[in-house]
Image: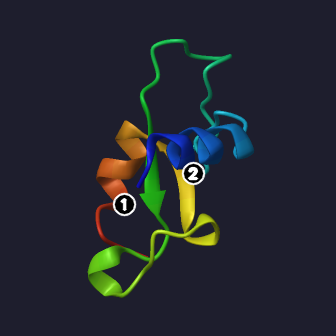
Amino acid sequence: MTPALREYIKKRDHYTCQICGDNICKNSDIILEIDHIIPVSKGGETVEYNLQTLCRTCNRKKSNKI
């Protein structure tokens, strides 16, 4: 995944976690990550429609679940 694609997904998602709704306006210390909705380990691809922005906390809880 390229840095440009990571930034595009964050911008598309308004720098907001798609699970908990936390964002950089509410919490400047938030760490945002790009998550595969369908994990690569389960056949997911690194394509725009399979990527979402999650905060680090939500991404760790989701792990490789769908």
Query: Mark 2 — residue?
Result: 19
Judge whether 37 appears above or below 11 on screen: below
x and y, in percent, of residue 49 in the image: 64, 70
x and y, in percent, of residue 28 in the image: 54, 12
- Within-10-Å neighbours for mark 2: few <14, some 14–19, many 20+: few
Query: Mark 1 — residue?
Result: 62
Q: Residue 44 appears in which quarter of the rendering?
A: bottom left
Q: Amino acid at mark 1?
A: Lys
Q: Secondary structure at mark 1?
A: helix
Q: Locate residue 24 relative to residue 1 in the image: left or right.
A: right
Q: Residue at x 44, y 49 (%)?
A: 2
Tell me which numbered mark, 1 or 2, is placed earlier along the sequence: 2
Tell which residue pokes out farthest to the top in this image. Answer: 28
Is the Cβ of the residue at disc 1 closer than 8 Å to that at disc 2?
yes
Q: Amino acid at mark 2?
A: Ile
Judge whether 23 appears above or below 13 on screen: above
x and y, in percent, of residue 52 in the image: 56, 56
Q: CA distance from mark 1 to mark 2?
A: 10 Å
Q: Nearer the viewer, residue 32 or 2?
A: 2
x and y, in percent, of residue 65 in the image: 35, 73
Q: Nearer the viewer, residue 4 or 36?
A: 4
Judge whether 17 appears above or below 31 on screen: below
Q: Quadrant of the C terminus?
A: bottom left
Q: Residue at x 57, y 38 (%)?
A: 7
Q: Residue 14 appears in which quarter of the rendering?
A: top right
The numbered dot on residue 16 is: none
Q: Secondary structure at mark 2?
A: loop
Tell which residue pokes out farthest to the bottom in this image. Answer: 43
Q: Locate residue 39 relative to residue 4 in the image: left or right.
A: left
